[in-house]
Amino acid sequence: MKKCAIFGREDGFWSAFVFIFLVTLAMLGIGSYTLVRSEGSNVSNDVRAVQAEYAANGAAFFGMKALWQGNFDSQLEESGLNIGNCTVTLDTSLDVSGSVWLTITATRGKAERQIQILIDPGLGFKDKAIVTTGIVSKVVALDENRVEDPKKLVSKADSIPTIKEDSLKAIAVAQGHKKVGNWIGTNNYPEKSFYSSVDGVTPNVTWVTGNFQLNGNTSVYGIFIVEGDVTINGTDRIYGTVYLPNEKSTIIRGGGTPGESTILGSIVSHGNITGKGAHITVQYDPVYMGEFCEFMKYPDSLIPQVVRWIYT
């Protein structure tokens, strides 16, 4: 008896099965290749995007520093920067308020990152009456014409410019003005003059290693570098600059004639400045502050304020 055809030779069946299996493997391989290639492309794009973002942020701080130091010129805008493998352009424009828009665009291949920063340029350090990394409470800054001017006051500053403290201390020692420990100032100290009588051009410098205090109806002159706290009482007056290199506080207890400032010159501090009472003002004096700024380690720079920071 002959076998039924359906149960005949199976060669054709297995050939078809193997063919379909191989086609399926090929399709899976092509799919895997396409997926891996796509993922590789995405990873590459992500890397470029990250590089562009880092380059834009770096260029933003570079551009702001150049603006503050007065080194941002047309050549920088025309040539731009190369950061890593990114091309970075910087552009500036004036806002209607007088502030500056700084636009940074970083590109890496098809990836692009842009930052727009609105900066209030502020004033130079030497143009300030009060500068501190701490807070200022109930103390008013005046300009040289005794007009209240908020721009003459900087509180919560990121940092204080580096001061040549060794030079100031050396002058104080040479003048016999080093005060070890706490010290209470005397009226008309040291010569009733901001400048030394020896040459008439060198400021009187007093170095107090402890706390510095004035107890009322006392006027003192010169640059005071105080390592401790400062307390000014009643009708005391300081003609010059008070500099606190450490995180110490200043308390000003006001009083006396309204037309007189507690400090005529400036105060530069790493601590809080607090006022108690009336007529507590620091009147900016360009001569006294200018003399103090001669002891800055680096050239004067602007004290700006970032108003807006926009990623686009």
Image: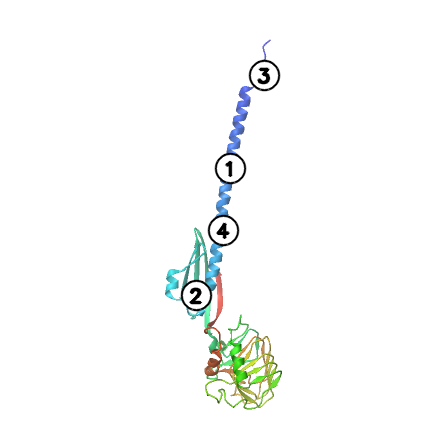
Decide which of tag 3 and tag 2 comes sooner along the chain.
Answer: 3
Discs 1/3, front: 1
Discs 4/2, front: 4
Percent x, y of residue 38: 49, 43
Of the numbered discs in the image, which one, if any, rests on residue 47? 4
Q: Classify mark 3: residues with Cα within 10 Å, few (<14), some (14-19) or many (20+).
A: few
Determine the CA span between mark 3 and mark 4.
61 Å
Of the numbered discs in the image, which one, if any, rests on residue 294? none
Residue with the mark numbered 3? 7
Residue with the mark numbered 1? 31
- Which residue sits furthest top? 1
- Which residue sits furthest right? 181
Determine the CA span between mark 1 and mark 2.
49 Å
Q: Classify mark 1: residues with Cα within 10 Å, few (<14), some (14-19) or many (20+).
A: few
Discs 1/2, front: 1
State yes or no: discs 1 and 3 in contact (Cβ < 8 Å): no
Q: Amino acid at mark 2?
A: Trp
Reply above or below: 234 against 1.
Answer: below
Decide which of tag 1 and tag 3 comes sooner along the chain.
Answer: 3
Q: Amino acid at mark 3?
A: Phe
Percent x, y of residue 180: 61, 83
Determine the CA span between mark 4 and mark 2.
28 Å
Residue with the mark numbered 2? 101
How many numbered circles are shown? 4
Q: Amino acid at mark 4?
A: Val
State yes or no: discs 1 and 2 in contact (Cβ < 8 Å): no
